[in-house]
Amino acid sequence: MRLFSDPFKTVDRLFDEISDSINEGVNRLFDKEIKIGVTGFSRGGKTAFITSLVNTILNFGNEGITDKLPRFSEYEKSGIYYGGIAPNHDLSVPAFPYHEYYDGLVKSEPIWPVATDNISEIRLEIRFRENRFLMPGEHRNLYIDIWDYPGEWLIDLVLLEQSYEDFSFMMHNQVKKLSKFVKGTEELLSLGSKLDPLRSPDPRLLKESVALYVNWLKECKALGMSLIVPSRQVLPGSLAGAPIIEFMPWLWDIPSDYPKDSLYAVMKKRYESYRKDIVENFYETMFSKLDRQVILIDCFSALKGGKEAFENVNDTFETLLKNFSYGENNLLRRIFSPKIDKVIFAATKADQVTYDEEKHLLSLLRSMVTSASHEIRGQNTNCQYMVLSSIAATKCLEINYDGKNTQVLSTGRDEDKYFYPGSIPSQWSEQSMDDFQKHFILRKLPPPLIKPGDIIPNINMDVMLSYLLKDKL
Ligand SMILES: Nc1nc2c(ncn2[C@@H]2O[C@H](COP(=O)(O)OP(=O)(O)O)[C@@H](O)[C@H]2O)c(=O)[nH]1
Ligand SMILES: [Mg+2]
């Protein structure tokens, strides 16, 4: 059409235009996209990780960046020259508030990114030059989608496979096991004498009962337990006040038969809606399209818990890993067929130990993961283990102590010149947990002091970038 409506256009120009647009189409065809899931228990460091990863990528193309990424050799090899934030794919999902978090970190009194209470997404764009056999030198884009969500929600994975009766049975055992440690357990159990599973529910009593259960969950959470389900009762996001989260496990004798609108039937129905509409839906959105999975584990807080927390962490971890792993029998694979081809386990907050302790942290991480999951054990090829600090709050220094060179940490603040936190066990066991509790000083560290515009200090973010991106560049 344009040929005839534009008499001045030469055939040559037309030809150029057509070949440009073919090239553009081909380029687009060669643009790559990668979806990265960042997973971990609550407070494990997901938001900090995403903030720091985004920060590093935004610094792509800036002078001096290569010195900061010595082990991300693909950066230079693939000719990366730009990194930026691209518009989100899904306009209905809140955008990850990167700038807010970064601005908080570069204040004179810096603050850690605030705890996440809802889902958010960020899409990043990396520009580089193609150096493979097809069109060398051609400009390419790699898009990276990353999702953040409250770690608490992850625990709901446990429910994917469970009927209301399974869920009730699991929580019944849990309540019994923890009865001596968790405040409010007696009161919760004695509810049974007031509730008639076969009668239609009294709305006020139902509300009060659920509130007791939710309080019990909150007590468990405060004690460092991780099996806090249903998670949205503790952290509802947009579901606050909705009937879909107003239910509890049946902790008493389970009736074999019950009328359709009885209390028992109502609880069961709400549980099932929760499992289907909230849990399944969440995992479908989060996991079905992921290419890579980063699993962040805060070994320090796991070691800090008591004996009950040890078992609880192990139980929950096992269930979670079962679902994350990509063996034949994997539930998620069956339901949502995820295409995850790489899993990276990272022990976070590695800035809390001296450099020479990092190898222990790595071995501890391995032992935690492999003791929890047989499938992972047999699947070493696509699994990476590493230690990481997304936002390093300390620097490791070497001082002369009693005539010996000794590594210590410093926060760079005047009031504490340096400190030695202790040694970390290299195996995950109850004994090592005991030792850790006796001998390790786990401080709550303030964020590092960063000048506005500076890159966020970290440990091993370049290694992470290489694992995540090298085969896509
Ligand atoms: N020392 C240190 N602390 C960290 C690091 N990353 C996270 N934290 C701490 O862990 C807390 C929870 O991190 P966050 O990213 O919000 O965890 P999330 O709940 O998994 O998103 C932060 O507020 C920090 O106190 C790190 O690299 N080093
Ligand atoms: Mg978070």
Image: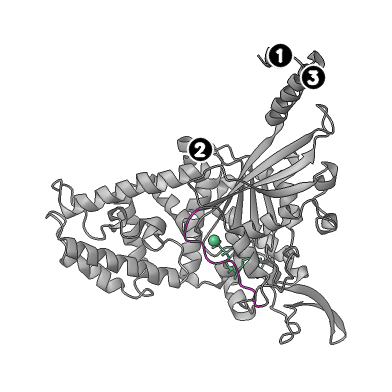
Q: Are marks 2 and 1 in contact (CB under 8 Å)?
A: no
The numbered disc on residue 3 is 1
Give how far apart the Cα atoms at labels 3 and 1 are.
Answer: 10 Å
SS of the residue at dot 1? helix
Q: Between disc 2 and disc 1, whose residue precedes?
A: 1
**Is residue 356 placed above or below 249 in the rendered structure?**
below
Residue 115: say if magenta.
yes
Residue 275 position, x and y percent, is 36, 47
Determine the image quadrant of residue 186: bottom left
Q: How is the image coloured?
A: one colour
Q: Is residue 72 magenta?
A: no
Mark 3 or 1, nearer chain start: 1
Looking at the image, is mark 2 or mark 1 nearer the viewer?
1
Q: Mark 3 or 2, which is nearer the eye? A: 3
| Residue type beneath disc 3 | Arg
Q: Residues within 10 Å of mark 3 (few under 14, many from 20)?
A: few
| Circle number at residue 333 | 2
Name the residue carrying label 3. Answer: 13
Residue extending farthest to the top is 4
